[in-house]
């Protein structure tokens, strides 16, 4: 038998909590329909593309005293996209609900992400199989992948695989792109009278799959707490040695929710927020000026050290960079498959790209260090996004700030020392043991996904709300996927996609940073959150993120 760590042994025993409405099982539920819905934008186009699944109402569940019997159902589940702590618990919750409804029900797991359903690679879950993964981090139970499910052929192969296994519902656990896949598949299954339902589950550490119905995607809680622990540790080190500026890039793709949350938990000296950079139209050089000014002012106070938190997606939000990257994405959509380009040397690639970009964008591209130019040409992900995790923005900033500070030194406006360390925290946080919050939330999302299936719904995202309250007060239900969609450019074409929720500059979370920024820059108000705790006082083990608390308290105050 595989040897387990003491924490693994303890976590396997943890019994996740459920909302009270789900505690009597999925056969004792009534469905309450809300009002009909509309997509967030581009209603006409989205309705046309999703003629069969558009406009459905939101739903919630109430527990009833009567118990209905439920027909035998086979369900398939897919883990899609980047890992997020708690994915295993979504599957465990789904499995438990499915077996609770009818012990003859079967759950199949498609291997390696969406490609598993297309290629018919799967496993059948059993009690023993699931029990080894309860409350553990990672997606290794069945693996994940980023294949985009969108072509007629892919849908047809998926249908054949479902028919072979007698599957009548598929659960896709993913972020905005993966749930866009879920919406497309749901629509195709209805249009072709297959009788197969599709339900999504909101996953992503990025925290950008949220709206009024989805308070947060799972994984955000654990990942931000893990990054906050690491930032806190570095702050202690910086404050002890007093000789380094640490530039810490934090994963989270486009939106800055993860960096903002980690900053609110730790109070570093500088926190950049991409959405603010874009709104204020801050150029790269103005960001350099802003940071250099703080470094120089701290040096005047004898502090040649500090912590700067940088969101992963920053580069795309700097207006001149964003425009260049969008132009580059369109160009790369054809160049990626052009063998003259792919076999060219780096220098040749740079000049090909510069000759194809418009004049303004070519100027911006050519001004960048070779390392960054190279990283900007890395393969796009299957959804056409530039892979921001591969662009070392933190190193770009260090290089440019060093140059700026040297100039300032010559001019007599900087008298200190600048020695910098760069870090990138991303993968460290994606597979941690889920926090108690994520363990409970994920289990509830999975359990609830089966409740949605049991009521015959399709094209819905599993929704569990009221998350700052104890779990028994959480509200379980579903949101139509089309409600979150709009049209955006992908691979050079307009496509229906779930709209990403970016940091709201008029919201309470950003305001908390804004109100404290100057104080945190000059006075060291570092917080040291320490490691995620699973056992001990509830005030330590069961706290949610600052983001969720602030957003929910604003929402509750406005009710
Ligand atoms: P999802 O949107 O699929 O959840 O992925 C999130 C993420 O962790 C991003 O924060 C990051 O930019 C990206 O995945 C990295 O992708 P990869 O794992 O392919 O390197």
Image (tube, rainbow, N blue to C red):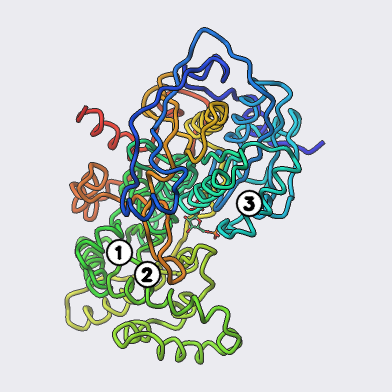
Answer whether residue 272 is visible to the viewer in this image. no
Judged left or right of residue 124, residue 331 is: left
Residue 499 placement (x, y as % from top left):
37, 52
Foreground of the two, 532 or 236: 532
Disc 2 secondary structure class? loop
Judged left or right of residue 253, residue 551 is: left
What is the spatial separation of the Cα atoms under label 3 and label 1, in whole angstroms? 47 Å
Give the answer, above or below, for where 351 lies relative to 458.
Answer: below
Name the residue located 41 percent from the left edge and 24 percent from the top edge: 475
Q: Going from the N terminus, do you reach mark 3 or mark 1 first?
A: 3
Q: Quadrant of the N terminus?
A: top right
Name the residue located 38 percent from the left edge and 46 percent from the top edge: 484
- C-beta proximity under 8 Å, tags 2 and 1: yes
Name the residue located 26 percent from the left edge and 66 percent from the top edge: 291
Tell which tag, 2 or 3, sits nearer the viewer.
3
Graded by Cα atoms within 10 Å as few (under 14), some (14 to 19) or many (20 or more), the crowding at tag 1 reads many
In the rendered structure, find residue 113 and report the number of the disc placed on it.
Answer: 3
Callout 2: CB less than 8 Å from ligand 1: no
Disc 1 secondary structure class? loop
Residue 367 placement (x, y as % from top left):
34, 85
């Amino acid at each position: 038998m595989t040897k387990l760590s003491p924490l693994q042994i303890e976590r396997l025993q943890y019994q996740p909590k459920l909302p009270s409405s789900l505690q009597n099982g999925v056969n004792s539920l009534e469905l309450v329909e809300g009002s009909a819905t509309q997509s967030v934008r581009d209603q006409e186009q989205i309705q046309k593309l999703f003629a069969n699944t558009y406009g459905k109402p939101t739903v919630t569940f109430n527990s009833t005293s009567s118990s209905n019997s439920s027909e035998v159902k086979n369900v398939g589940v897919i883990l899609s996209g980047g890992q997020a702590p708690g994915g295993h618990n979504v599957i465990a919750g789904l499995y438990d609900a499915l077996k609770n409804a009818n012990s003859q029900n079967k759950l199949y797991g498609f291997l390696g992400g969406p490609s598993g359903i297309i290629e018919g690679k799967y496993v059948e879950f059993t009690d023993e199989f699931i029990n080894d993964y309860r409350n553990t981090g990672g997606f290794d139970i069945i693996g994940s992948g980023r294949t985009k499910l969108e072509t007629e052929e892919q849908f047809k192969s998926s249908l054949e695989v479902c028919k072979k296994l007698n599957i009548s519902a598929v659960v896709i656990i993913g972020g905005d792109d993966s749930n866009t896949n879920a919406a497309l598949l749901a629509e195709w299954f209805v249009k072709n009278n297959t009788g197969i339902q599709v339900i999504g589950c909101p996953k992503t550490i990025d925290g950008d799959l949220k709206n009024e119905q989805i308070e947060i995607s799972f994984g955000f809680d654990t990942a931000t707490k893990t990054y906050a622990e690491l930032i806190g540790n570095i702050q202690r080190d910086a404050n002890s040695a007093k000789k380094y500026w640490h530039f810490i890039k934090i994963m989270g793709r486009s939106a800055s929710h993860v960096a903002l949350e980690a900053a609110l938990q730790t109070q570093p000296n500088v926190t950049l927020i991409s959405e603010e950079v874009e709104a204020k139209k801050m150029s790269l050089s103005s960001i350099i000026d802003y940071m250099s000014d703080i470094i120089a002012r701290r040096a005047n106070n004898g502090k040649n050290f500090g912590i700067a938190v940088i969101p992963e997606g920053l580069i795309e939000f700097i207006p001149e960079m964003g425009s260049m990257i969008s132009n580059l994405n369109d160009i790369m959509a054809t160049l990626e498959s052009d063998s003259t380009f792919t076999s060219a040397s780096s220098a040749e690639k740079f000049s090909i790209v510069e000759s194809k970009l418009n004049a303004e964008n070519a100027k911006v591209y050519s001004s960048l260090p070779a390392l960054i130019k190279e990283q900007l040409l890395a393969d796009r992900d299957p959804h056409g996004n530039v892979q921001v995790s591969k662009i070392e923005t933190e190193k770009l900033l260090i290089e440019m700030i060093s140059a700026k500070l040297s100039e300032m030194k010559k001019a007599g406006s900087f008298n200190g020392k600048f020695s910098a360390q760069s870090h990138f925290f991303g993968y460290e946080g994606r597979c941690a043991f889920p926090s108690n919050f994520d363990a409970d939330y994920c289990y509830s999302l999975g359990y609830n996904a089966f409740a949605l299936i049991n009521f015959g719904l399709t094209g819905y995202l599993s929704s569990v709300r009221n998350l700052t309250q104890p779990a028994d007060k959480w509200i379980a239900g579903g949101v139509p996927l089309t409600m979150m969609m709009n049209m955006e450019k992908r691979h050079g074409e307009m496509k229906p996609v779930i709209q990403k929720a970016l940091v709201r500059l008029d919201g309470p979370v950003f305001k908390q940073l804004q109100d404290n920024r100057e104080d945190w820059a000059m006075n060291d108000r570092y917080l040291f959150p320490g490691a995620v705790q699973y056992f001990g006082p509830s005030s330590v083990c069961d706290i949610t993120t600052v983001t969720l608390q602030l957003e929910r308290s604003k929402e509750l105050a406005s009710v």
